[in-house]
Image (cartoon, helix red, strand yellow):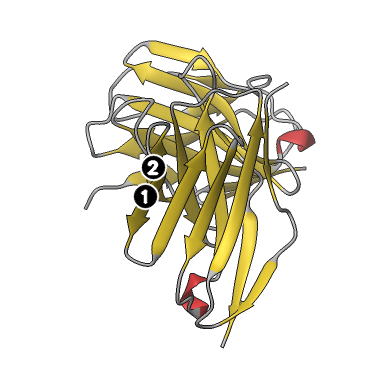
């Protein structure tokens, strides 16, 4: 089954403790992206990647890192999480940046 | 600045009626526009893509129009059903064409 898999689904952590949210897709998609979704602010793009080893900032990249060492994986790294990064995070992939996005089921992160 | 506006108030309609949702945008010149459906706590699911040279697109009970002069897209669900209740998001590429930006979404409630 074609899918984008994010882990974990839920994560509660403390300020400053580094964490990684994994994202994997099995559709051989070139384009991958991370969004965060907050009430009243909608979906905002954090980082995206057009291909292996090619990443670029979205609208809200501060406090986040990504890597794209393999085509299928696009982890999101929070080196020093802060409470304002408490949010619902979605990973998405597509054939190209002009193609429809396939989203994962989300990771709900709480930073205390 | 670029802006995508969807009615933030929920749309309540009776089962069997046609639901019409609006997406307005400013300072964009999109080559296409996409519509997604999002259920609570889940990732958005792609529904339809309409290109700038297409006035209308249909898929089963869904119809999308795209007026680049008015800078507006309308999303229609005919013969609506309670199962259509969800939040509907429109999305446009940025002017560089390398990122997809989402509107805030409109919540649709279809009552039996």
Q: Residues within 10 Å of mark 1 (few under 14, many from 20)?
A: some
Please tell me the numbered disc located at residue B4. none
Name the residue rendered at 32%, 17% in the picture: A51
Q: Which residue is mark 1?
A: B57
Vertical order, B101 against B40 (above or below): above
Q: Residues within 10 Å of mark 2 (few under 14, many from 20)?
A: many
**Subunit that carries the residue with mark 1:** B
- For this orientation, the residue located farthest to the top is A53
Look at the image and tell me whether residue A35 can be seen: yes
Name the residue rendered at 54%, 23% in the picture: B29
The part of the image, by quadrant, that contains residue B109 is: bottom right
Vertical order, A1 against B110 (above or below): above
Left or right of residue A28: residue A111: right
Name the residue rendered at 38%, 67% in the picture: B61
| Disc 1 element | strand
Locate the N terminus of chain B and report the quarter of the image it occupies.
top right
Look at the image and tell me whether residue A105 can be seen: no
Left or right of residue A26: residue B103: right
Residue A53 place in picture, x, y as percent: 36, 11
> Which comes sooner in the sequence, label 2 or label 1?
2
**Subunit that carries the residue with mark 2:** B
| Disc 2 element | strand
Q: Which residue is mark 2?
A: B49
Q: Are dots 2 and 1 in contact, CB under 8 Å?
A: yes
Name the residue rendered at 75%, 60% in the picture: B9
């Amino acid at each position: 089954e074609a899918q984008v898999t994010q882990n974990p689904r839920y994560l509660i952590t403390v300020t400053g403790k580094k964490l990684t949210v994994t994202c994997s897709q099995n559709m051989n998609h070139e384009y991958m992206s991370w969004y965060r979704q907050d009430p009243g602010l909608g979906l905002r793009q954090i980082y995206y990647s057009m291909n292996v080893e090619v990443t670029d900032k979205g609208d809200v990249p501060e406090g986040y890192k990504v890597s794209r060492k393999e085509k299928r994986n696009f982890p999101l790294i929070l080196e020093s999480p802060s409470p304002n990064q408490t949010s619902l995070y979605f990973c998405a992939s597509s054939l190209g940046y002009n193609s429809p996005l396939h989203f994962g089921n989300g990771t709900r992160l709480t930073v205390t | 600045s670029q802006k995508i506006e969807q009615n933030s108030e929920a749309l309540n309609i009776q089962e069997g009626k046609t639901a019409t949702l609006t997406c307005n945008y400013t300072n964009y010149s999109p080559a296409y526009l996409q519509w997604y459906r999002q259920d609570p706590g889940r990732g958005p699911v792609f529904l339809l893509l309409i290109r700038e040279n297409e006035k209308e697109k249909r898929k089963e009970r869904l119809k999308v129009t795209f007026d680049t002069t008015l800078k507006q897209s309308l999303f229609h669900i005919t013969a609506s059903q309670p199962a259509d209740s969800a939040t509907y998001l429109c999305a446009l590429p940025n002017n560089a064409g390398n990122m997809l930006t989402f509107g805030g979404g409109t919540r649709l409630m279809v009552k039996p």
